[in-house]
Amino acid sequence: MIDTIEAKPITNRPRRMAREPKSAGAVEAPASTPTPKDEPKPPKPPSKSSLVLQMLQRSEGATIAQLVAVTGWLPHTTRAALTGLKKKGHQVTSEKAEGEERVYRVVAG
């Protein structure tokens, strides 16, 4: 006695893709509706690094305590930012009067 087993066709599950490919017949949005690209973006606030540079370019310069207060960084991070400015080519100077805090400046040049 021979059993005949009907062979079922192998069906693969449809592939799941992260992004569906665009089909040739896709309908695009009409040009009259504004898209997010058309709307102007609000200006970005200045970066902390640019704030540090602006403070150092003032005639009175800035102390580490002032820079820490503006940026919210820890003092060692603030000193590292000063080192980064030196590496970028800015000439950072420091002066310390007796009984006062050290004042840092960027010399224009």
Image (cartoon, rainbow, N blue to C red):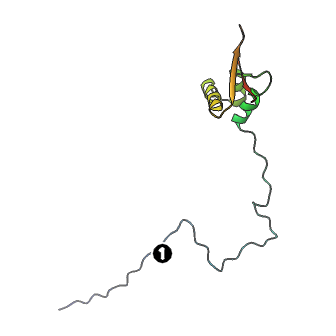
In this rendering, position of residue 23 left or right of residue 66: left
Give the image quarter of residue 79: top right
Can residue 55 be seen by looking at this rendering?
Answer: yes
> Whole-percent x and y of residue 39?
80, 58
Q: Which residue is mark 1?
A: 14
Could you say where residue 24 lies in the image, as x and y percent from the top left?
Answer: 63, 79
Say which quadrant the N terminus sits in.
Answer: bottom left
Relative to residue 9, is residue 45 depicted above or below?
above
The residue drawn where x is 38% and y is 81% is: 10
Q: On the picture, is 76 further left or further right than 37?
A: left
Q: Looking at the image, how many numbered discs can be counted on the residues? A: 1
Query: Which residue is at 45% across, 75% downward?
Result: 13
Q: Please name whichever residue, 76 or 35, is drawn nearer the observer in this view of the structure.
A: 76
Figure check: 38 above or below 16: above
Give the residue furthest to the bottom. 1
Task: State the image coordinates of residue 64 (x, y, percent, origin top left).
Answer: 68, 22
Residue 85 appears left or right of 46: left
- For mark 1, give the secondary structure: loop
Look at 66% across and 33% down and name the residue there.
Answer: 89
Q: Quadrant of the C terminus?
A: top right
Q: Residue type at mark 1?
A: Pro
Residue at the outermost left position: 1
- Residue at point 79% right, 71% down? 31
Q: Is residue 68 left or right of residue 34?
A: left
Residue 61 image point, x, y percent: 76, 22
